[in-house]
Image (spheres, rainbow, N blue to C red):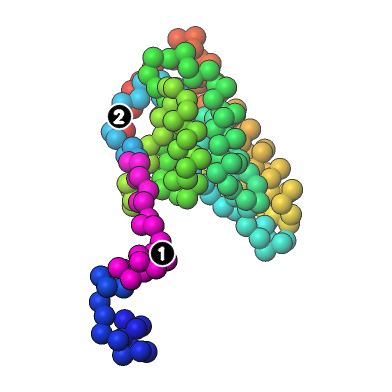
């Protein structure tokens, strides 16, 4: 097109390609990258802890600095425990993978069913590093929700509503350190002392302890 406009040469794409090839200035054709299909979030039945974790990112605000901070939170949908979280000025794939790695110490590999970690389609969760991490561990599956389906990760969304209402809105943070300390305190309260009526009125930690001793009745969740 440029040759026609600027030099008034009648020529087509095939001839340009042939001439460039003869002159040795034709680039090699690009090899399209193989697209690895990701696993979509499917309906499943959860019958115990460490079968389905939901992971998502939320941001908070430091009024004293007029800056945002980030939390990445991972909840077990069965016992409602926050099995891992990251809180920082940034929230990279590396930060989230470190959180997942630490949470895996929860002795998940003694069960017969694999552990599914469900996320949305955020950039951290679509990265090659995130995919490769899960591909490298047997018994660990990553699945992503379809677009515009927040109900597919309703438990972590519900937790974020609680975090916003009971922590973020009750404080005016003046520094990052103040915000991070408040999040740490809230996570301890949520896991160990905040009661859940869906867990027979126990906190996540109390419920799990009683479940392991058969002191409460197990149940099933259809998700």
Residue under the point 53% across and 18% down? 107
Looking at the picture, how far across and down is residue 205, in whole percent? 55, 23
**Magenta segment:** 17-37
Residue displayed at 70% across by 54% down? 173
Taking depth in this image into account, of 59 and 193 the one nearest to the observer is: 59
Q: Quadrant of the N terminus?
A: bottom left
Q: Is 24 placed above or below 178 here? A: below
Q: Position of residue 132 (x, y in %)?
A: 47, 35
Total residue callouts: 2
- Residue furthest front as drawn: 22
Residue 209 visible to an observer of this rendering: yes
**Disc 2, SS:** loop
Q: Is residue 198 visible in this depiction of the protein?
A: no
Magenta span contains residue 172: no
Residue 11, horizontal then vertical, whole percent = 26, 80
| Mark 2 to mark 1 CA distance (whole Å) | 57 Å
Name the residue: 39% across, 22% down: 114
Image quarter in which the C terminus is found: top left
Residue nearest the observer in this picture, 127 or 174:
127
Label 1 secondary element? loop
Residue 17 vs residue 180, the one in the foreground:
17
Magenta span includes 26 = yes
Q: Main secondary structure of the magenta part?
A: loop
Mark 2 and mark 1 residues within 8 Å of each other at the beta carbon? no
Residue position marked by numbered label 1 in the rendering: 24
The residue at the point 37 percent across, 19 percent down is: 113
Neighbours of disc 1 within 10 Å: few (<14), some (14-19), many (20+): few
Q: Nearer the viewer, mark 2 or mark 1?
A: 1
Task: Name the disc covering residue 44, or none.
Answer: 2
Instruction: Name the spot of residue 39 as percent of width and height, x first.
Output: 33, 37
């Amino acid at each position: 097109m440029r040759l026609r406009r600027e030099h008034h040469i009648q020529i087509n794409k095939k001839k340009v390609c042939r001439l460039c090839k003869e002159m040795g200035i034709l680039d090699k054709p690009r090899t399209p990258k193989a697209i690895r299909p990701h696993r979509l979030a499917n309906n499943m039945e959860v019958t115990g802890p460490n079968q389905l974790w939901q992971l998502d990112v939320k941001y908070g605000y430091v009024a004293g600095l007029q800056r945002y901070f980030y939390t990445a939170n991972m909840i077990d949908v069965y016992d409602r425990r926050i099995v891992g979280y990251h809180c920082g000025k940034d929230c990279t794939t590396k930060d989230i993978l470190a959180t997942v790695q630490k949470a895996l110490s929860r002795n998940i590999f003694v069960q017969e069913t694999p552990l599914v970690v469900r996320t949305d389609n955020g950039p951290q969760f679509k990265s090659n590093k995130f995919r490769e991490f899960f591909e490298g561990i047997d018994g660990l599956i990553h699945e992503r929700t379809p677009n515009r389906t927040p109900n597919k990760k309703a438990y972590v969304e519900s937790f974020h509503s609680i975090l916003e209402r009971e922590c973020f809105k009750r404080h005016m943070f003046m520094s990052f350190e103040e915000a991070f300390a408040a999040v740490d305190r809230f996570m301890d309260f949520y896991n160990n002392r905040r009661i859940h009526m869906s867990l027979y009125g126990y906190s996540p930690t109390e419920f799990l302890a009683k479940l392991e001793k058969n002191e409460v009745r197990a149940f099933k969740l259809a998700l």
